Amino acid sequence: MKKKLKVLFDNLCCSVCRSGFDEDSITIKRQEDGLLVVNLSCAKCGKNFGVAFVGLSDLEVKDESRIPLEIQEGPEPITYDDVIDAHRFIRDLDEHWREHLPKIN
């Protein structure tokens, strides 16, 4: 799996030491159906680049060295007003904040 994920970071390098990312740069934190939570860090200098949520499909890839990537249309980009609205929402949560979480069966 790390080999497949490495393709996503092939054209990137560490902003600190300019070293390329390899399979050792990726740590899988959590794996569920159709979703991976991964952490990216530089294997050479240790700079941590944070966590990413990677959606997976049931695509079969014959040549695992290259995975076809699809550009997906998504919602409009987040605006400054969206961030301010989210801040106000979180700031104003009271003791009933759990009511806003989805129900887990």
Image (cartoon, rainbow, N blue to C red):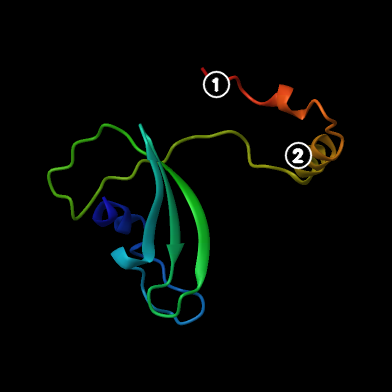
Q: Amino acid at mark 1?
A: Ile
Look at mark 2 in the image and give the residue it sits on.
82
Q: Going 53% across and 59% down the picture, which residue do you hit? A: 50
Q: Going 50% across and 73% down the picture, which residue do you hit? A: 47
Disc 2 is placed on an element classified as helix
- In the figure, residue 70 lies in which quadrant? top left
> Farthest residue in the left direction?
62
Disc 1 is placed on an element classified as loop
On screen, residue 42 versus residue 24, left or right, reads right
On screen, residue 95 versus residue 73, left or right, reads right
Q: Which mark is residue 24?
A: none
Look at mark 1 in the image and give the residue it sits on.
104
Q: Earlier in the sequence, mark 2 or mark 1?
A: 2
Q: Position of residue 76 (x, y in %)?
A: 63, 36
Disc 2 residue crowd, few under 14, some 14–19, many 20+, Cα 10 Å: few
Q: Going 55% across and 21% down the picture, which residue do you hit? A: 104
- Residue nearest the viewer, comparing 81 with 57: 57
* Mark 2 vs mark 1: in front: 1
Q: Amino acid at mark 2?
A: Asp
- Residue nearest the viewer, comparing 74 with 35: 35
Q: Is residue 87 above or below residue 25?
A: above
Q: Position of residue 63 (x, y in %)?
A: 14, 49
Q: Is residue 62 above or below residue 6?
A: above
- In the figure, residue 31 lies in which quadrant? top left
Q: Going 72% across and 27% down the picture, which residue do you hit? A: 98
On screen, residue 95 versus residue 24, left or right, reads right
Q: Position of residue 103 (x, y in %)?
A: 59, 19
**Mark-to-mark CA distance, 2 and 1:** 27 Å
On screen, residue 17 versus residue 58, left or right, reads right
How many marks the image carries: the answer is 2
Contact between marks 2 and 1 (CB within 8 A): the answer is no
Q: Position of residue 1 (x, y in %)?
A: 26, 50
